[in-house]
Image: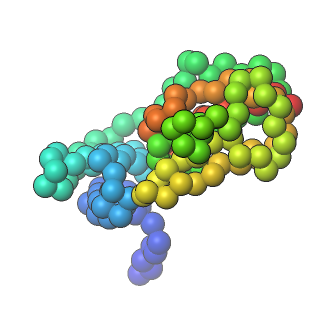
Amino acid sequence: MRRRRGGAGNDPADLARRLGTLLTELQLSEIEASVGDVRVRLHRASTSGTLAPTHAPVPVASPAPAAAEPTVGAITIEAPMVGTFYRAASPGAEPYVREGDVVKQGQILCIIEAMKLMNEIESKVGGRIQKILVENGQAVEFGQPLFLLER
């Protein structure tokens, strides 16, 4: 008999253990993941670090953000990690970019703070900032749209 390696499969308990490890390592207050028809969500119930797992079969489809209506040819820059979005290097500094600015590939667009580390997020392409989709200081999720760029 062969055993699968390296994945949580559809075992809710295994997925909950893996998410609990991430929750602790990343010092998050909440985390959620879906594998197949299994969804697991963990959140800290109090400052004591108690985890409250819940799981239930749910459809995986999620609606796209209503505010993110890109024009034809627009490119979405997404959050590469979970953290806090900052438009500038410090509270009193000028933002890295504003709507309407033309940016080059590799130019810093924002910072995402994760685990007390400041991660500079660079543009993967050149273009004009059409829309900034998140507010300064807002928590962002992995894959969440941050910017719309026109090429």
Compare residues 74 and 133 and report the one nearer the observer.
Answer: 133
Residue 85 coordinates in the image, percent (x, y): 52, 40
Horizontal and vertical percent position of residue 130: 74, 23
Q: Nearer the viewer, residue 86 or 37?
A: 86
Percent x, y of residue 86: 54, 39
The N terminus is located in which quarter?
bottom left
Task: Determine which quarter of the picture holds residue 128.
Answer: top right
Q: Is the C terminus in the top left, top right, bottom left or bottom right quadrant?
A: top right
Nearer to me, 3 or 5: 5
* Residue drawn at point x = 54 percent, y = 47 percent: 112
- Residue 51 is at least partly visible in this image: yes
* Residue 132 picture location, percent across and down: 64, 27
- For the point 59% across and 27% down, which residue is it? 133
Q: Quadrant of residue 71?
A: top right
From this view, report whether residue 150 is shown above or below residue 107.
above
Q: Is residue 30 left or right of residue 126?
A: left
Q: Nearer the viewer, residue 54 or 10?
A: 54
Colour scheme employed for the rendering of this structure: rainbow
Q: Residue furthest front?
A: 92
Residue 127 lies in quadrant: top right
* Residue displayed at 22% across by 48% down: 44
Residue at left 81%, top 22%?
72
Q: Is residue 52 visible?
A: no
